[in-house]
Amino acid sequence: MKNSISAIILSCCVSTAFAADDFHFGIEGGLVASEIDVDDGAQSLANKTGRTIYYTRERGAPSFRIFGTFPTSENVNIEIGYLNTSSIDVDFSASGTTDTINAAVEISGLDFGIKYNPKESFYLKAGVHRYKIESNVTGQIAGYTFVSSSETGIGPFFGAGYQANEHLTVGINFLASIGGNSDNSASYAYVGYQF
């Protein structure tokens, strides 16, 4: 529901900004490589079950982002966007049992930043995001499991990229404190097209 509200707000911002000739809309596709903290959860499960807990996790997932950008000067643009990833799977297993737990983690939310072009084909970005990190849990180990959870919070991001022409961009952003949790970070590599 909150994602839907965020998307509606972004659409309203885009609709309003389209009244200005200099506003541009764009889309990006890429890969989010995550560093999501799971050690505490694995340790908690080990304490409850009395077993050695093992886990494997995907390091990344496909993602997409829509954005609107508006210039404030010749080299500076304001940008607002909405990011969404597919699920990043974390799988837990334990010694002495075939039981498993799967946590499917997704990241989504709004970001707001400044894009600065010190040179015509090179740019820097910095700003803040308000992303939600949501985990959907299935399975159990020795009668224990995790509760599906959702965290939403504010964190910073910064990045850089290459502007191949007036439409095509390639870049990477570094995202900190995803969901407001300083243990959750990610990098987002993308290819973008600006209309």
Image (spheres, rainbow, N blue to C red):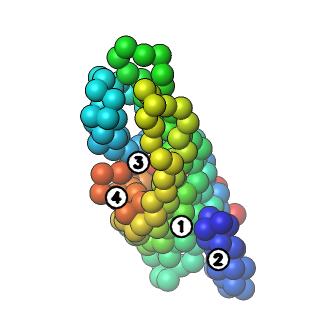
The crowd level at tag 3 (other Cα within 10 Å; few <14, some 14-19, many 20+) is some
Identify the secondary structure beneath mark 2.
Answer: helix
From the image, state whether disc 4 or disc 1 is nearer to you: 4
Among numbered discs 2 and 1, the one appearing first in the sequence:
2
The amino acid type, in three-letter code, at marker 4 is Asn
Query: Looking at the picture, how far across and down is residue 131, in whole percent?
Result: 48, 62
Left or right: 188, with 49 as reference point = right
Identify the secondary structure beneath mark 1.
Answer: strand
Disc 3: which residue: 187
Left or right: 68, with 60 as reference point = right
The crowd level at tag 2 (other Cα within 10 Å; few <14, some 14-19, many 20+) is few
From the image, state whether disc 3 or disc 4 is nearer to you: 4
**Residues at badges 2 and 1 in contact (C-beta under 8 Å)?**
yes
**Residues at badges 4 and 2 in contact (C-beta under 8 Å)?**
no
The amino acid type, in three-letter code, at marker 2 is Ile
Identify the secondary structure beneath mark 4.
Answer: loop
Work out how far the residue at label 1 is from the one at label 3, CA to CA, in angstroms: 16 Å
Among numbered discs 4 and 2, the one appearing first in the sequence:
2
